[in-house]
Image: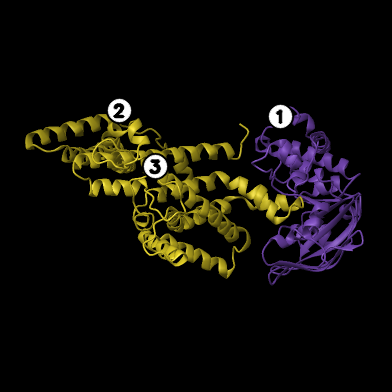
Amino acid sequence: MAKSIDVSDLNIYYGDFLAVEGVNMTIPARSVTALIGPSGCGKSTFLRSLNRMHEVIPGARVEGKVVVDGQSMYDPAVDPVEVRRQIGMVFQRPNPFPTMSIRDNVLAGLRLNNKKLKKADADDVVERSLQGANLWNEVKDRLGKPGMGLSGGQQQRLCIARAIAVQPQVLLMDEPCSALDPISTSAVEDLIHELKTDYTIVIVTHNMQQAARVSEDTAFFNLAGAGKPGRLVEMNPTKKIFSVPDQEATEAYISGRFG
Amino acid sequence: MSATQQSVQEHIPLRHPRLPRWAPVLVGVASLALSGILSLALGWHVVPWVIVALLLYVLILPGWSRVVENPRAAKDRLMTSLVWASLGIALVPLVSLLYKVVAKGLPQIDGNFMTYSMRNIVGPGGGVYHAIIGTLLITLAATIVSVPIGLLTSIYLVEYGSRSRIASWIRFLVDVMTGIPSIVAGLFAYALFVLITGTEGIHLGFGGSIALSLLMVPIVVRSAEEMLKLVPGDLREASYALGVPKWLTIVRVVLPTALPGIVTGVTLAIARVIGETAPLLIIAGFTDSVNTNLFGNAPMETLPVFIYYSYTQPGVDASVGQNYAWGAALVLIVIVMVLNVGARLLGRLFSPKSGH
């Protein structure tokens, strides 16, 4: 069920402003790809363009091709809603729905799409998703309680459970651990390790150690200069990026010397 | 360098003399007493007594504080007393209004008053049943007309047209509508129904509802718009990322999250129009009989109109009619209060749960 993603000559705009320029990349299936780079270099923008969340922002648009499983995602005949059902997303800040219980949050993706679920099936989905997100043991006795009552780390794992409950083929994560403490971070990283057997995962992170720990491949984005668009500098297996990167700029960034 | 070192070593006192805890109470009692002596000596009424006491309080407490404490504390005392004084002044009309209405209206309220109309009644023995029915029906119909229009408009303004030119035009026109004098709304509704039915001098309850909804719609639009704007964009994105279409996101995520605020806004709008008199005088008319048909060409009495006529044309025995007016005023206030409390409870029921 996991799919690979081919990106070619992708330009991403906010109105007239070119934010990301000329990205070519192949994201392999059933593997974790990390996107690193300084703030404002377009990592999150690029990530959001992978499931057409980018265009939610007024004036935002994309040029170029993103091909998932042989289908061009920006084809005029493609419904962005369908794309998002197959490519899930986890955000930087945990955002459970405040009006819903833990159980309803997990089922939100199915329920909100007006799917009728039998109670037994719904119970299965809830347990499977929460197990998958390493949250089941912590919340199984209070599924009816509001999702907002959980701690930040638990909320983030709840959001991951919510994202995998709809069984997407790809999971995009936009700095999923930046608002979490080290223990919750480690829980989410363990989870990423488990999930990659089933899902294609793309993760944006500012934490170099995290990229090294969780990913198979790493892509380094950088700005060409102040006010210029961000671009992909280098994409290579993580081991290579963190030992002998092809580009000098990558090495400078990874070793803490900006240049 | 040596200067900073010196200032670090210098002893900075953190303890200052403070007025005792009971100082404000003492000054309050003292100013009341002082002003009381003055008013006894000069034969003042209650109002100047309280005003002079207030002035004395505002002068004495900061003055004392200035002598014992420091200028900053004195300013703090001054501002604190002014804030409390303003609160007190703002409460005076509210409390006195409620007191007067309850004192004059409560003796009127009995089973007879609540269940009889004024049909064939001159003098005592009548009631406001017909006016309660009219007010509830007309306001209910006005709510049913204006809530969908107002809510859908605000959804358009926030979710679809947020930055478009048409949205800013709608916002402007809604603001203009907020300022429409209510009597003009009544004239509009009258003219509208004369055009539709061709009957000059038409009276009907639903016309009153249309006039009231003209006044309600802008309030609902603006309050619902503010509430929808408060829903975090994160939640919309979370929903989109699950593959939920935009309209379902609005219906299932945005509206429930904003619901308590929207309910409050609608209640405020109802409270605003339920006491309207002028437009209803024109289009709903007045009658002494019960009328439950909103759509027939027959006048329908409402509480504000009842109050107006009972007070201005009380009939043979003026005191009886005026007592009716006070009783009806109390009923109207109670209806508004029940609505407010009901809306609070509803809002609490639906509000996002924190889990604590």
Amino acid type, mark 1: Arg
Quadrant where the C terminus of chain B is found in the figure: top right
Q: Nearer the viewer, residue A249 or A29?
A: A29
Name the subunit of mark 1.
A
Residue B92 visible, this orientation: no
| Helix, strand or loop at mark 2 | loop
Which chain hosts label 2? B
Q: Is residue B165 left or right of residue A210?
A: left
* Image position of B183 with respect to A110: above or below: below
In the visual, does B67 lie left or right of B233? left
Give the CA distance from mark 2 to mark 1: 49 Å
Instruction: Spot the residue most to the bottom.
Output: A16
Q: Which chain is yellow?
A: B
Distance, label 1 to label 3, CA atoms, is: 47 Å
Give the letter of the purple chain: A
Q: What residue is drawn where x is 19% and y is 43%?
A: B318
Q: Is residue A113 above or below residue B196?
A: above
As helix, strand or loop, the secondary structure at mark 1 comes to: loop
For residue A220, side relative to residue B307 (left or right)? right
